[in-house]
Image (cartoon, rainbow, N blue to C red):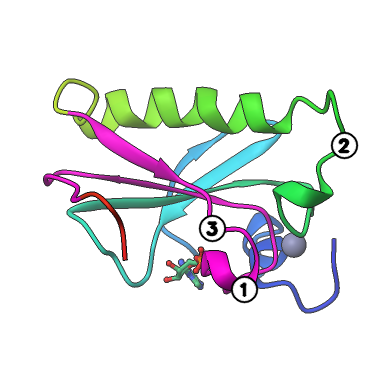
């Protein structure tokens, strides 16, 4: 657990969250500032600052994508489609330095993003 990391604290149950999915490695919860009817933050329970901190061959990214698959089915957006977004670093718009993906759905997603 990283010092003062809000997502580590959510993973440890120290800060409440609206959890929609959990397994041994992954936690997913509703974003407090939703940008779509379905907006879920998917995190590994282990702290990585960003995808740039993930070692080659680590299973974490596959686990996140598999969780996204299951959550999309549960949330009823698997058929209509969704967007899975990773913001990395300052120019990528990453504000929380604990690896996470946004699962966005329930409306049409414009392209390109802002
Ligand atoms: P990013 O800007 O890609 O780093 O995304 C961080 C996301 O985490 C934002 O969409 C925030 O709204 C969301 N967020 C921050 N704190 C919390 C929290 N305590 N519970 C749920 N979502 C949060
Ligand atoms: Zn963390």
Quarter containing the N terminus: bottom right
Mark 1 close to ligand 1, CB under 8 Å: no
Toward the viewer: 96 or 30? 96
Q: Is residue 10 left or right of residue 77?
A: right
Give x and y (percent) for residue 51. Answer: 71, 47
Seen in the picture, residue 96 relative to 74 is either above or below; the reply is: below
Give x and y (percent) for residue 89. Answer: 65, 66
Kindly identify the residue that appears in the image at 58 percent across and 52 percent down: 100
- State how far apart marks 3 and 2 are (Cα): 18 Å
Q: Is residue 66 left or right of residue 31?
A: right
Q: Secondary structure at mark 3?
A: loop
Q: Residue 12 lies in magenta, yes or no?
A: no
Q: Are marks 3 and 2 in contact (CB under 8 Å)?
A: no
Quarter containing the C terminus: bottom left
- State how far apart marks 2 and 1 are (Cα): 21 Å
Kindly identify the residue that appears in the image at 53 percent across and 28 percent down: 65
Picture disc at residue 55: 2
For mark 3, what is the residue?
A: 87
Q: Which badge, 2 or 1, comes first in the chain's sequence?
A: 2
- Near mark 2 (Cα within 10 A), the count class, few <14, some 14-19 or many ≥20, is few
Picture disc at residue 56: none
For mark 1, what is the residue?
A: 90
């Amino acid at each position: 657990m990283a010092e003062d990391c809000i997502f580590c604290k959510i993973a440890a149950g120290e800060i409440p969250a609206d959890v929609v999915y959990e397994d041994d490695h992954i936690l997913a919860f509703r974003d407090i500032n939703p940008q779509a009817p379905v907006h879920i933050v998917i995190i590994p329970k282990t702290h990585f600052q960003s995808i740039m901190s993930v070692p080659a061959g680590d299973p974490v990214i596959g686990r996140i994508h598999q969780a996204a698959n299951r959550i999309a089915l549960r949330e009823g957006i698997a058929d209509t489609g969704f967007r899975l977004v990773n913001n990395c670093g300052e120019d990528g718009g990453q504000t929380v330095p604990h690896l996470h993906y946004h699962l966005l759905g329930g409306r049409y997603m414009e392209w390109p993003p802002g």
